[in-house]
Image (cartoon, rainbow, N blue to C red):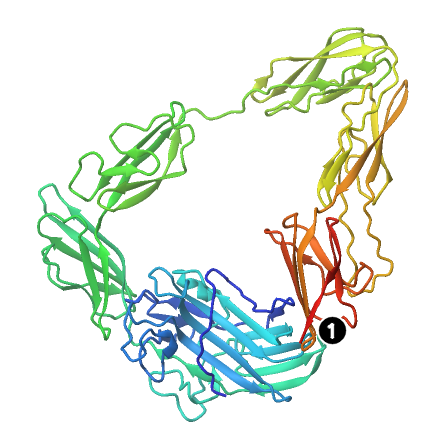
């Protein structure tokens, strides 16, 4: 049952990848086990000289280091090293991928098929080349075995339960989590953890320093659900009920080496110098507790190798500087407890302190003051991101400051501080009134005065008539008022809005009232639109209207939004596609337009007008190539559409659209291309296919090439 090492591809940035063939959609669902999870990965160690973490720690305090040596119990993949005969070295002869944990099992099912399950914590490169900055570590769960398409299985393993439906390539699932370069904590979100290791109660014992011998299958411990086994059950595809158990194993191959080195990280390295050239360096580092962490001798700065002081994995040192700190000066910190000794280098930066950040809202001035631990205080040493150098004078013309500012030094240091403001408090502006009304209108028609377009904080409205025959205003204290004119003439009204900021300037609204006149309806010009798109109707060119009413007269049914307004909308229906699997004797290709009627009314009468909205057919379906292979009953069909992305295409067997469908409808991509790759149906003596799109394009009787 020993698992064989092999190349395992991964795509950077993909958090969960379910590998499946083109022909079908994979169905793989991670099921929450009935028992609570009791462990996980909890800590990532310092980065080593190769740019990957030196180790990972789990909740059982097991630390595993990267297997990047020629160790036979913790080997690298020989085909992943440029020169397998040379020693492993970074970056010239470093593997393309390696493992902290490599664990798996091969289970022989009752039908003789071998199922493989892998559970790894893997290091790899985002672009599959050794490029600094592309380092990533992810947790992987992979399950593979041959099975008939459509069969459903439940696989219980140490890191959970997966419910998987087989595709035409069987069960083929891979889940990779944590594939963002340099975001090494992303692997904590995977299902890997705690680490699996040989069960100490079962002989033989694991080799000293290792979680097991990958060449020997063995019982394990470490599952966070206490499921230290593999169980594969077949399920009813519809109900999910267990049909029977197909395989079981509690023997695993595991590879991993306990971390003996702790590594070291430099969290911060700063310098302070006075005007006379004297000063000191401060170093903040981190590693495992109890390590011998030192700063290396630095003749350029004038100090010798010296031990840092440690507490709970934090380390600190303060060292004298002789003379000035050269530009670009670095320090090296080493962990003498490691073998080989771990080393880290960091550039020294000055310490920046922001002493004042004050924004005056009245004059738009931002005052920033800061200091640097570098003795050089000349202009240009300190600057504020987005504003420029600190000169002692405030930055002016700042109408909206950021919530915080960052000060950077030419010495490499930086500091961020919150912005605090002063000045008069802001209050609401006084409102701005805006009013509209219909024009012209007829005697006896209800007229609305609409002030809803007014802006600002508004507590009340006031409409007042200022000219024209006297009328009674309804809702004169609301945003929308109304009146019914009884005589011909010009009517004028003013609107003022009042709020916490004061009273708005008055705005005047005028409407012309004419004698009794029947309305005229204008539903707008006829339109041609693409199926599935929104359609906007416009009846505003109608005259003397009191009410609008739209209805559909003919064509495929649509749903009108705003049917009693001047400008309703609807979505033009897509072309219905032949149903899967068919045949579709009743299928009808419907290219009829949508006809709508507008009815307008006022006290003098009623008028109607119609508009025709026609579907714009997809200009063509072209480039159709169709091949059917008798050996595996497989169709491969592709083509192009003039409309890009958004519509679907259905392929039908035969020279009409009433036959059996070949697969389900597929989407057209952004380049206008589509393809179908499915198993069945067998064409028999038929040697043509027909294609229809949801936007109305048709291609009939495209020839089929039949091969073995």
Q: Could one spot residue 36 in this view of the protein?
A: no
Image mark count: 1
* Of the pair 601 and 132, the residue shown nearer to us: 132
Is residue 149 among the parts visible in the rendering? yes
Q: Quadrant of residue 212?
A: bottom left
Residue nearest the viewer, comparing 107 with 8? 8
* 617 vs 350, nearest the viewer: 617
Image coordinates for residue 620, horizontal then vertical, percent: 70, 49
Q: On the picture, is 466 further left or further right than 271?
A: right
Q: As displayed, is residue 3 above or below residue 82?
A: below
> What percent of the width, then of the height, locates residue 591?
81, 46
- Residue lying at the far bottom in this picture: please name it: 203
Q: Residues within 10 Å of mark 1 (few under 14, many from 20)?
A: few
Residue 278 higher or lower than 680, as above or below: above
Residue under pointer 1: 239
User: Against 237, is 553 above or below?
Assistant: above
Query: Which residue corresponds to the image point at 33% horizontal and 86% vertical from the top-left?
Result: 208
Q: Residue furthest right?
A: 605
Name the residue located 55 percent from the left edge and 87 percent from the top edge.
249
Q: Quadrant of the C terminus?
A: bottom right
Q: Is residue 620 left or right of residue 66?
A: right
Residue nearest the viewer, comparing 694 with 306: 694
**Residue visible at 68% across and 24% down?**
452
Q: Secondary structure at mark 1?
A: loop
Q: Quadrant of residue 658?
A: bottom right
- Residue 451 position, x and y percent, is 69, 21
Residue in the image at 59% along x and 83% along y: 231
Residue 607 vs residue 364: left or right?
right
Whole-percent x, y for residue 448 in the image? 77, 20
């Amino acid at each position: 049952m020993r698992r064989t090492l092999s190349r395992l591809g991964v795509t950077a940035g993909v958090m969960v990848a379910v590998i499946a063939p083109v022909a079908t959609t994979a169905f793989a669902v991670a099921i929450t086990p009935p028992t609570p999870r009791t462990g996980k990965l909890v800590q990532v160690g310092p980065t080593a000289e190769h740019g990957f973490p030196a180790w990972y720690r789990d909740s059982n305090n097991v630390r595993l280091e990267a297997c990047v040596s020629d160790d036979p119990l913790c080997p690298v993949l020989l085909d992943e090293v440029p020169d397998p005969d040379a020693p492993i070295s970074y970056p010239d002869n470093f593997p393309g991928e390696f493992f902290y944990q490599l664990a798996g099992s091969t289970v022989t099912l009752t039908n003789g098929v071998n199922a493989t399950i892998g559970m790894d914590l893997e290091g790899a490169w985002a672009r599959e080349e050794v490029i600094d900055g592309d380092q990533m570590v992810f947790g992987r769960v992979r399950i593979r075995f041959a099975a008939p398409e459509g069969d459903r299985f439940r696989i219980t393993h140490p890191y959970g339960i997966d419910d998987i439906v087989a595709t035409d390539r069987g069960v083929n699932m891979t889940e990779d989590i944590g594939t963002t370069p340099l975001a090494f904590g992303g692997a904590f979100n995977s299902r890997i953890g705690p680490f699996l290791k040989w069960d100490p109660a079962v002989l033989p014992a694991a080799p000293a320093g290792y979680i097991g011998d990958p060449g020997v299958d063995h019982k394990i411990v470490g599952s966070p659900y206490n499921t230290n086994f593999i169980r594969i059950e077949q399920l009813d595809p519809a109900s999910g009920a267990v049909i029977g158990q197909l395989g079981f194993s509690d023997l695993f191959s595991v590879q991993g080496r306990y971390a003996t080195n702790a590594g070291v990280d430099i969290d911060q390295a700063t310098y302070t110098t006075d005007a006379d050239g004297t000063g000191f360096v401060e170093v903040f580092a981190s590693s495992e507790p109890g390590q011998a962490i030192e700063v290396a001798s630095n003749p350029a700065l004038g100090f010798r190798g010296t031990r840092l002081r440690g507490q709970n994995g934090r380390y600190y040192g303060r060292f004298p500087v002789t003379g000035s700190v050269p530009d670009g000066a670095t320090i090296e910190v080493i962990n003498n407890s490691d073998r080989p000794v771990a080393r880290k280098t960091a550039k020294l930066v000055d310490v920046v302190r922001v002493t004042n950040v004050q924004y005056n809202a009245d004059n738009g001035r931002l005052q920033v003051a800061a200091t640097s631990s570098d003795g050089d205080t000349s202009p240009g040493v300190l600057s504020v991101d987005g504003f420029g150098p600190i000169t002692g004078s405030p930055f002016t013309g700042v109408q909206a400051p950021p919530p915080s500012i960052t000060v950077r030094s030419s010495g490499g240091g930086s500091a961020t501080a919150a912005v605090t403001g002063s000045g008069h408090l802001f209050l609401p502006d006084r409102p701005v009134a805006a009013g509209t009304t219909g024009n012209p209108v007829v005697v006896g028609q209800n007229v609305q005065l609409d002030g809803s377009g007014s802006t600002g904080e508004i507590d009340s409205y006031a409409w007042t008539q200022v000219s024209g025959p006297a009328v009674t205003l309804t809702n004169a204290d609301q945003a929308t008022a109304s009146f019914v004119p009884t005589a011909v003439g010009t009517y004028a009204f003013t609107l003022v809005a009042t709020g916490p900021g004061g009273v708005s300037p008055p705005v005047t609204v005028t409407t012309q009232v004419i004698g009794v006149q029947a309305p005229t309806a204008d539903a707008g010009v006829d339109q041609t639109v693409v199926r599935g798109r929104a359609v906007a109707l416009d009846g505003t060119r109608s005259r003397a209207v009191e009410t609008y009413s739209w209805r559909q007269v003919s064509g495929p049914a649509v749903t009108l939004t705003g049917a009693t307004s001047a400008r309703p909308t609807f979505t033009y229906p897509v072309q219905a596609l032949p149903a899967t699997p068919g045949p579709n004797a009743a299928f009808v290709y419907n290219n009829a337009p949508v006809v709508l009627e507008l009815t307008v009314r006022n006290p003098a009468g009623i008028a109607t007008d119609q508009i025709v909205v026609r579907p714009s057919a997809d200009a063509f379906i072209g480039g159709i190539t169709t091949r059917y292979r008798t050996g595996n009953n497989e169709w491969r069909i592709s083509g192009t559409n003039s409309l890009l992305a958004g519509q679907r295409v259905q392929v039908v067997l035969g020279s009409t659209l009433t036959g059996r469908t070949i697969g389900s409808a597929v989407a057209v991509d952004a380049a206008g291309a589509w393809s179908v790759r499915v198993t069945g149906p067998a064409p028999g003596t038929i040697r043509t296919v027909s294609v229809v799109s949801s936007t109305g394009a048709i291609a009939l009787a495209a020839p089929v090439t039949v091969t073995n």
